[in-house]
Amino acid sequence: MRTLRGSSNSVCATGGVNLTRRCGRRREQRIDSPVVFSHLRVAESPTGAGRGVFAQRPIERGELIERCPMLIVDGAQGDALTEGADGYVFGWGDSSTALALGYGSLYNHHFDPNATTTEAGDELVITAVRDIDVGEEIFINYLGTAVDPDAVWFDDVVTP
């Protein structure tokens, strides 16, 4: 069991995978976490792009894959986040920087993706644009709908 100390100096114990939490004198409560998905897994991508997100079961076209809460920061904090987590952050709005929580920052890029992203308030919503097979890597297009290879800011990798 891990022990976490919050900003109010309260000590909370989390029960790991059983997703329970005890804080102070409160009774044990279930923690609903968007990070734990039985239909997804993170593994090394065969494209050479590092880790990627893969389907653990068939995912149908139009199905919600994940709702990722976004950690959104501006100014110097955004610069620091970009420097510390380069390759995992997004531009958000006109001048903000965001880190997708859950698996959101681990989806790899493809110009012909099998999933799409939509900004919904302070969440990134990932939805299948076609049927996805078990074991298939889930890709998004980092540029939205653009298909210009010269527009990407990262090194090309082999795409399946």
Image: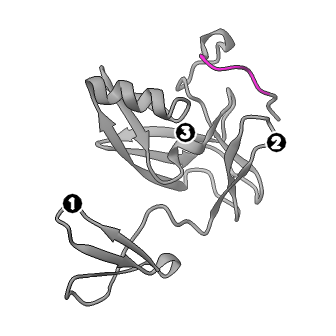
Asked if residue 92 shows in the view, the reply is no
Residue 7: assigned label: 1
Identify the residue at image location x=60%, y=12%: 151
Quarter holding the C terminus is top right
Marks 1 and 3: in contact by CB < 8 Å?
A: no
Residue type, mark 1 in image: Ser
Contact between labelled residues 2 and 3, with CB atoms less than 8 Å apart? no
Q: Is residue 23 above or below residue 38?
A: below
> Where is 93 relative to 35, above or below?
above
Q: Which residue is mark 2?
A: 46
Q: Which residues are magenta?
A: 153-157
Q: Say what amino acid the circle numbered 2 marks.
A: Pro
Three-letter amino acid code of the residue under disc 3: Thr
Spatial CA distance of label 1 from label 2 is 41 Å
Q: Position of residue 48 (x, y in %)?
A: 79, 35
Residues under labels 3 and 1: Cα distance? Answer: 36 Å
The numbered dot on residue 116 is: 3
Can residue 73 be seen here? yes
| Left-right relation of 62 to 95 | right
* Colour theme: one colour
Instruction: Indicate left or right for 160 with 138 as reference.
Output: right
